[in-house]
Image: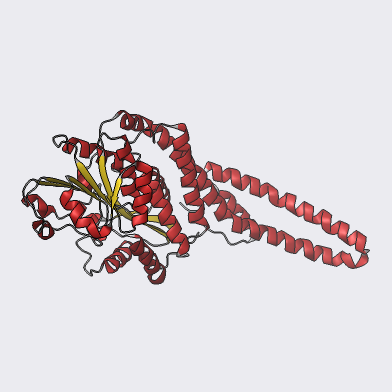
Amino acid sequence: MQGKFKVLTLSYKNAPIHIREAVALNEIGCRNLLDKVKEYTACKEVMVLSTCNRTEIYYTSESELTRELVKLIAMEKGFIATKGILPYFEEINDHEAAVTHLFRVAIGLESQVVGDMQIMNQVKNAYQWAIEADVVGPFMHRLLHTVFSANKQAVNTTSFRDGAASVSYATVEMVEELSAGIADPKVLLIGVGDIGRDVCLNFQKSHIGKLTIINRTHHKALELAERTGAGTAYWENVWREIEKADVVICSVPGDCFFISGEKMKSFSNPLSPKIFLDLSMPRSIDVALENQGNVSVYNIDDIRSRTTEALERRLASIPAVEDIIKEAVAEFNVWVSELTFSPVLQQFKNHLEQIRKQELARYVKKLSPEESQLIETITQRMLNKIVKLPAIELKAACQRGEPDNLLDSLSILFDLEKTKAVN
């Protein structure tokens, strides 16, 4: 690994929704930003994660690159000044804290609804985009697969992912609550990305029966409708469907589709009661709609976790999940330390191999081919056993978190170059 692992993060914990949507990136934006980081910085390994709750850059670098990375985000979003967004970004420059942060985010401990199942798929997508941009090396490959393994352990051995205490389920609960006074409410779901799909699947457990799905790619809406028993409509009829619906749920980013107050005024009955739930980032529903008739608009920050038995079980499982993360981080750090001492160990082996060959060269001319081969085999095995001893001791020292003393001794004894371990 070249450089230390760091995180630049902006999340719902310290940034209001208008700031989060200002820096939110779709897939194309994330891919473009990866290319920019690769071109304009010295980072060797990078991953960009952007959801409705957070925008983060995970990277390896000797120096902290907050200002440079924020400028690149601003470039990608099409604005120059960064002083309005810079204060909301936080840097995690300590290696172990940065590694732990990725585990906590990916597994769902840092989600707005604890244990949210959507975040792991979002991390996997971010990882895949980074691979395709050729900005992932051995360090991040190992780190992400360790994260995936820890997540699997959390799912299989705790109640952290039990039930449906997710943003998508919270959306369905909220629709049921808000439409309680409407007889047989008509619900329109616009967009079937990850969160839209999950919302639709959760409606199968709801008493609400009139759900219509609409999506730019119609066959995706059809596939989901067949699976869930919902109805569908074509994208070219989206405004007609919005006008007919009592509840509109939109997860299409606002830079692709926007429901404005002006558009609503063109409806045949613009003052009819209507409930909008905006799950998009950037937002896709004009908050000014609330100034028109009996219209209510709710955004992602309004959709809070419901006090359910499932959520209570998840909250009770947090200590067990944190133990899993702690063990996984310790295991990963051992691997990092081993990665650090491997070059020194290889130098040590090369040093001994040079001595072995020099000594053999003095006598091999006096030996028959059979004797030469025998001596070659014996001395090679001796060398391997000699190298094995410090390798075992170094591995044990890594597990204790103290490989530096042994590395120093080995380097001094044999005049080897030493690479510092990651702190």
Answer left or right for 332 relative to 279: right
Answer left or right for 419 relative to 63: right
Residue 370, by quadrant, is: bottom right
Answer left or right for 172 relative to 41: left
The number of discs equals 0
| Coloration mode | secondary structure
Residue 72, by quadrant, is: bottom left
Give the percent coordinates (x, y) of residue 135: 46, 63
Q: In this view, does 243 lie above or below 70?
A: above
Q: In this view, does 188 lie above or below 1?
A: above
Between 340 and 42, the residue placed more toward the observer is: 42
Between 413 and 59, the residue placed more toward the observer is: 59
Give the percent coordinates (x, y) of residue 271: 6, 50
Between 275 and 341, the residue placed more toward the observer is: 275
Residue 199, by quadrant, is: top left
Give the percent coordinates (x, y) of residue 80: 23, 70
> Which residue is painted at 10% across and 45% down in the image?
273
> Which residue is painted at 37% across and 34% down in the image?
318
Can residue 108 be spotted in the picture?
A: no
Give the percent coordinates (x, y) of residue 4: 44, 57
> Which residue is painted at 81% across and 63% down in the image?
359
Between 197 and 232, the residue placed more toward the observer is: 232
Can residue 83 be spotted in the picture?
A: yes
